[in-house]
Image (tube, rainbow, N blue to C red):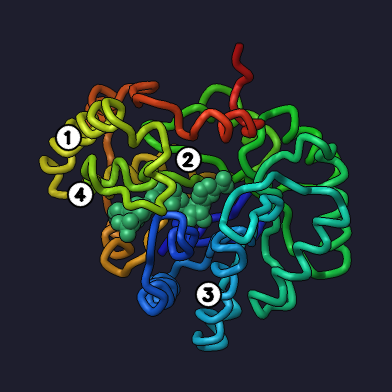
Amino acid sequence: MNTLQLGATGPRVSAIGLGCMGMSGMYGPSDRAESIATIHAAMDAGITLLDTGDFYGSGHNEMLIGEALKGLKPSQRDAALVSVKFGAMRDPAGGWVGYDARPAAVKNFATYSLQRLGVDHIDIYRPARLDPNVPIEETIGAIADLVKAGYVRHIGLSEVGPQTIRKAVAVHPVCDLQIEYSLISRGIEDEILATCRELGIGITAYGVLSRGLISGHWTKDSAGEKDFRAHSPRFQGENVERNLALVEALRKIADAKGVSVAQIAIAWVAAQGDDIVPLIGARRRTRLDEALGASSVKLGADDFAAIERAVPKGAAAGDRYAAAQMASLDSEPRRG
Ligand SMILES: NC(=O)c1ccc[n+]([C@@H]2O[C@H](COP(=O)([O-])OP(=O)(O)OC[C@H]3O[C@@H](n4cnc5c(N)ncnc54)[C@H](OP(=O)(O)O)[C@@H]3O)[C@@H](O)[C@H]2O)c1
């Protein structure tokens, strides 16, 4: 597995990271033993970056990663870099009840994350969203205090736009911005990517397979009941049919190259720059193996042109989140 430097100030990480969210309920039920086996297989394959959020399964995901880390050889445990998001709040039924990124909340969230993960520091710590009631400078200042005290190594951001990024780096260096980026979510190309490059901030790209939609395995009836995708605009009615037609266009290119659709989609994001780390949401070893195969897919100029014809920028039907969640994204241009 290749490695790369995450931003000008960040750690060296594997060129592909493992996103663990789907192992804790966001995409319906998952298998605990298979989840841990997938984390171990990822580490065996050279993946060092594990991404989580304290709100994924309300602590479940961090405890799962903590358990997986305990099962590793000391050398592998030392190599693992855990990236944690905080700030999103949930009720006991799993409902989303807002954000809290006040300085005291930051320190409180971090304290619990350290316990659940069973570690003495968090490698990269980031607010999941901009808290509209708290200046980003205060949130970053609180994480900077945790860096000074040794509880956090690096600071990251998530789904914020250029102005917020600039305010954040004025307080403390930021190693990466975590943001959705895929063939059908290319908003960061307009301004955010250039801002990050100017400021020496890497990108950890999520939703590279658009949460499975462009993996080549999705069908219009795949979403279960307690699945984020059952409520996501791109997975609904006519939208999903139009989006799956894009996948079929992509499949022709994949078939001609003897690779899978998911591999093309991952390789395309990885090819956008050596400052971009795709976070892969595999929760089973079979999916992980397929994703790892993307590392050996070479895309040439003809491939890029064919991919662009099959899935032109802006081709997706439906927004990447439901309206209320779109409104909480500082990274999206304001509408209306
Ligand atoms: N910062 C943020 O706001 C934010 C938001 C969302 C996610 N994230 C992070 O980013 C990570 C990845 O995001 P994502 O879940 O949206 O990822 P994704 O890779 O776009 O989608 C993952 C989904 O695709 C399915 N899939 C099908 N083929 C696959 C393959 N070959 N490899 C991997 N998955 C395959 C997965 O498994 P099944 O087939 O088993 O369903 C899963 O349901 C998350 O785990 C989380 O850590 C961050």
Q: Position of residue 213 (x, y in %)?
A: 31, 42
Disc nearer the start of the sequence (2/3): 3
Q: Quadrant of the C terminus?
A: top right
Could you tell me the amino acid type at mark 3? Answer: Leu
* Residue at mark 3: C-beta within 8 A of ligand 1: no
Please tell me which residue is depicted at 52% across the width and 74% down the height of the picture.
64
Q: Quadrant of residue 32?
A: bottom left
Q: Secondary structure at mark 3?
A: helix
* Res. 273 mark: 2
User: Furthest-front residue in view?
Assistant: 93
Label 4 CB-ligand 1 distance < 8 A = yes
- Does residue 14 sit above or below 41 in this rendering? above
**First in sequence: mark 2 or mark 4?**
4
Residue tagged 3: 64
The residue that label 1 is drawn on is 248
From the image, state whether disc 2 or disc 4 is nearer to you.
Answer: 4
Instruction: Give the label on residue 260, or none.
Output: 4
Which circle, 1 or 4, is nearer the viewer? 1
Viewer-nearest residue: 204 or 133: 133
* 4 and 3 marks in contact (CB < 8 Å): no
- From the image, state whether disc 2 or disc 3 is nearer to you: 3
Q: What is the quadrant of residue 86 in the picture?
A: bottom right
Q: Nearer the viewer, residue 92 or 212?
A: 92
**Image side of residue 26 versus residue 330, left or right:** left
- Residue type, numbered disc 4: Ser
- Percent across and percent down for residue 202 are 60, 45
Q: Nearer the viewer, mark 4 or mark 3?
A: 3
